[in-house]
Amino acid sequence: MSYAIVVHGGAGPRRDQEHGEAARAGCLAAAEVGAAVLAQGGSALDAVEQTARVLEDDPLFNAGYGAVLNADGDVELDASVMDGETLLAGAVAVVKTVKNPVSLARLVMEKTPHVLLVGDGAEAFARAQGLATIASGSLVTPLQHQRWLTRQGSTHGTIGAVAVDARGQVAAATSTGGTAGKLKGRVGDSPLIGAGTVADSRWAAVSCTGAGEFIIRVGLARSVLEAVRHGASLARACEEAVAELSRLGGDGGVIAVTPQGEVGWAFCSERMAGAFVRADGQRGTFFERSP
Ligand code: ASP
């Protein structure tokens, strides 16, 4: 059985070449971190968490440090993780004082009987678990503050990782600051299992990015998984799921892996940054749709 990991750094409108190169490099660097976990026999779950943490810490991406700001000028973070081996999942939403929400999502999965904790409750749980919390506001970068003041710049984005380990088990993780200027308390698809994230080691692991209000309504991640379950190739499953998103008027994309080590992605937005690494040494990046 061979391992593989795919990463995305968010979908959206076309950006300049400089941004494209930086996003590709950031995604590949994060994918390499996950691939190193997998190469040492680590689990897909560990790989996607470690990879997501790297992307959360990179201010280039809309997750963790560098997330977009809501209408009030605050960061409110959403994240989720799902283990395809156990079908357990954990998620958090509207979190402001946790540097790496993906790790808090994993703690929800492993230490509570719940799937989703939000707001104050999620932050109290983080403190109770000894997860380092930070001052509210310290995740706001000068660039995002400037964008909030001028109401200009990138409106959304997200990070995600899907992996299959050497045992053929899959996992998925997604983390985001959501959409710029969103109403306080708005929750997108990223922490919703079946919408932004899903993993089942019989079929696939999927992470999504794009217009959350549309992704929720089409159940985007689960629609990829269900297509694979009903016999579609991974590439076709990704394409058809994204076509349905587009039909409704939403933009965005998906990344996916199968337990057999196939990697796939598709997007209907102009851009979706991403990268993949496979056990056979193949690696690569993607960014824009061909014009
Ligand atoms: N899906 C995210 C949300 O709606 C944003 C994005 O991926 O662009 O919160």
Image (cartoon, rainbow, N blue to C red):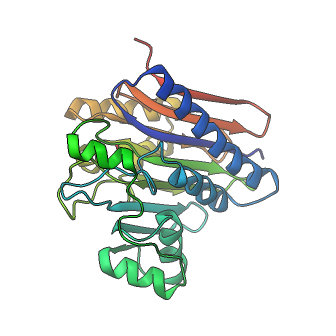
Where, by quadrant of the figure, is residue 83 drawn?
A: bottom right
Residue farthest to the top? 291
Residue farthest to the right? 40
Relative to 129, does residue 260 appear above or below in the rendering?
Answer: above
**Residue 219 seen in the figure:** no
Residue 42 at x, y percent in the picture: 75, 60
In this picture, residue 1 sits left or right of residue 87: right
Relative to 51, does residue 233 appear above or below in the rendering?
Answer: above
Residue 67 at x, y percent in the picture: 38, 52
> Going 21% across and 65% down the picture, which residue do you hit?
185
Relative to 218, does residue 267 appear above or below in the rendering?
Answer: above
Residue 10 at x, y percent in the picture: 43, 40
> Going 46% across and 65% down the picture, which residue do you hit?
101
Where, by quadrant of the figure, is residue 215 drawn?
A: top left
* The one of 243 and 139 positioned closer to us in this rendering: 139
> Going 28% across and 51% down the picture, which residue do you hit?
216
Q: Quadrant of the C terminus?
A: top left
In this picture, residue 51 sits left or right of residue 221: right
* The one of 274 and 247 positioned closer to us in this rendering: 274
